[in-house]
Image (tube, grey):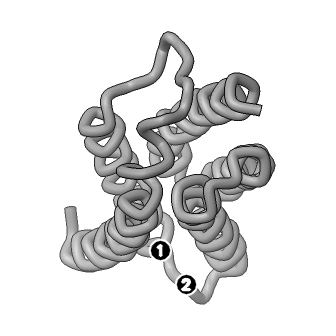
Amino acid sequence: MNSKLFIRSSFAVVICLIFGFMGTVATQTGLAEWYQHLEKPWFHLDVDLFSWVWIFMYVLMGVAAGIVWSKGFYHKWVKTALIHFGFQLSLNGFWFLIFFALEQPLIALLDLIILFIVILFTIKWFRIVSSTAAYMLIPYAVWVLFAIVFNFEIWRLNS
């Protein structure tokens, strides 16, 4: 790993973890009062495990973005890929706010569906720049699919 890749990946990981931290703050708002009283599906995860999986996903996302970024921001495909990445990262952060802080599971579900679509586009653009980076986003896409099913069940069971 060259120093440019290491520095850019490290910076991208920190940015992703900052979004994760902001999600944690939003989560704490609704976790103690609202979330614990919801009826949950049989496949719900412990909050600690849920948090660790998100941390792992943010690290994977950051490294993938760093790989793409290291190919040269001057290139239009790199810019396009990173714009998609930034958009999906924003949608990701909004989900925590909508679901936990605003206590709106239906709107959060819609956010997740849009997020998943944008992740697929991000994977497509990352693949143009680096297939390794694209493959690193696949676990994230699968995780978001799980989150969609989970969020849907929370909405269905508590509507």
Where does the C terminus fall, quadrant-wise? top right
The amino acid type, in three-letter code, at marker 2 is: Phe
Q: Secondary structure at mark 2?
A: loop
Above or below for 149 versus 134: above
- Name the image quarter holding the N terminus: bottom left
Vertically, is 87 above or below 42? below
Query: What residue is pinned by disc 1?
Result: 69
- Residue 122 is situated, as x and y percent measured from the top left of the image, at 67, 56
Q: Is residue 34 above or below residue 77?
A: above
Q: Residue at x 23, y 70 (%)?
A: 6
Q: CA distance from mark 1 to mark 2?
A: 6 Å
Badge 2 local density, few (<14 within 10 Å), some, or many (20+)?
Answer: some
Q: What percent of the width, then of the height, locates residue 33?
A: 42, 51
The quarter of the picture where residue 44 lies is top left
Residue 9 in the image: state x and y as whole percent: 31, 69
Q: Position of residue 113 (x, y in %)?
A: 77, 44
Q: Which residue is mark 2?
A: 73
Q: Residue at x 72, y 34 (%)?
A: 155
Could you tell whether 32 is left or right of 72 in the image? left
